[in-house]
Image (cartoon, helix red, strand yellow):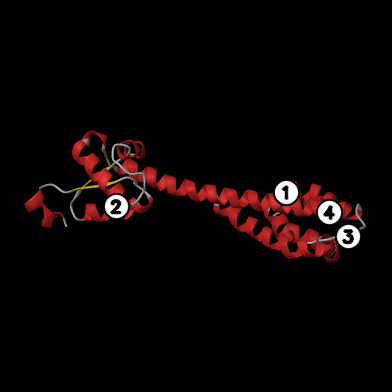
Amino acid sequence: MSGAFRPKFGTVLVIVDQVANIGALPLTVARAAGCRVAYLPGLSMRRAADLYPGEAKTDARDAFVIAETARTMPHTLRAIDRDDETLAALTMLTGYDNDLAGEVNRATNRLRGLLSQIHPSLERVLGKRLAYPYVQALLQRHGSPAKIRKLGRARVEALLKANGSRKAHHLTTEIFEALDEQTLVVPGTETSALIIPGLAAQLGAARPSRR
């Protein structure tokens, strides 16, 4: 590409307004073709766009603004070095981590809300421990007070211990003491038993991905 244009136009300069996202591929292609590359920062891009008529934001208008800015105000351009690429990679990873953090918060809040609705005493025991894999495993497989009670103390303790709890006996005692505090079944309990395992699974998948 660069070789085809250089005889007629001289040095080829490829400019983007985003180093990451949609700008990553054009930059890679341009470098591979031997072109120089540069970056027009977002603030400079917005200021330059204000100098031209029209308010509609289109790809064609953005390309025109970038080209004219490079031609008339080359001092606004920034060279792209490896630090920019590192920053782009970190931005990508940070965005992904933020998404995961949002998933963790949503699943945690929803689980605590459902447990508080159907069995407040059980929520007081498990809600503060939802970050632990052994609690997630218990709720994934036995997502209602009735199912946990049916499983029995010995098997609950074994499940907790198998999934990493160092105080499985103590936690099992807390769980069954909480279960004994409520004898009535709140409307919606059966429906929540269909939702809780899925939320616990989401939480179990999202939290390890953030490590």
- Of circles 3 and 2, the one toward us is 2
Seen in the image, is 144 located left or right of residue 76?
A: right
Mark 4 crowdedness (10 Å alpha carbons): few <14, some 14-19, many ≥20? many
> What residue do we see at 32% from left, 52% from top?
59
What is the three-letter code of the residue carrying label 1?
Arg
* Res 129 label: 1
Q: Identify the secondary structure beneath mark 2.
A: helix
- Give the residue at x 87% y 51%: 178
Q: Which numbered circle lies on residue 119?
A: 4
Q: Between residues 29 and 45, which one lies in front from this camera angle?
A: 45
Q: Quadrant of residue 42?
A: top left
Mark 1 vs mark 4, CA separation in Å = 16 Å
- 43 relative to 59, above or below: above
User: Looking at numbered disc 2 in the image, what kind of residue is underneath it?
Assistant: Ala
Kind of element beneath mark 3:
loop
Contact (Cβ within 8 Å) of mark 4 with mark 2: no
Residue 60, percent from left and from top: 29, 52
Quarter occupied by residue 154: bottom right
Q: Nearer the viewer, residue 110 or 62?
A: 62
Label 1: how many residues lie within 10 Å, few (<14), some (14-19) or many (20+)?
few
Disc 1 element: helix
Q: Which residue is mark 3?
A: 185
Frontmost of labels 1 and 4 is: 4
Give the spatial CA distance, label 4 vs label 2. Answer: 58 Å
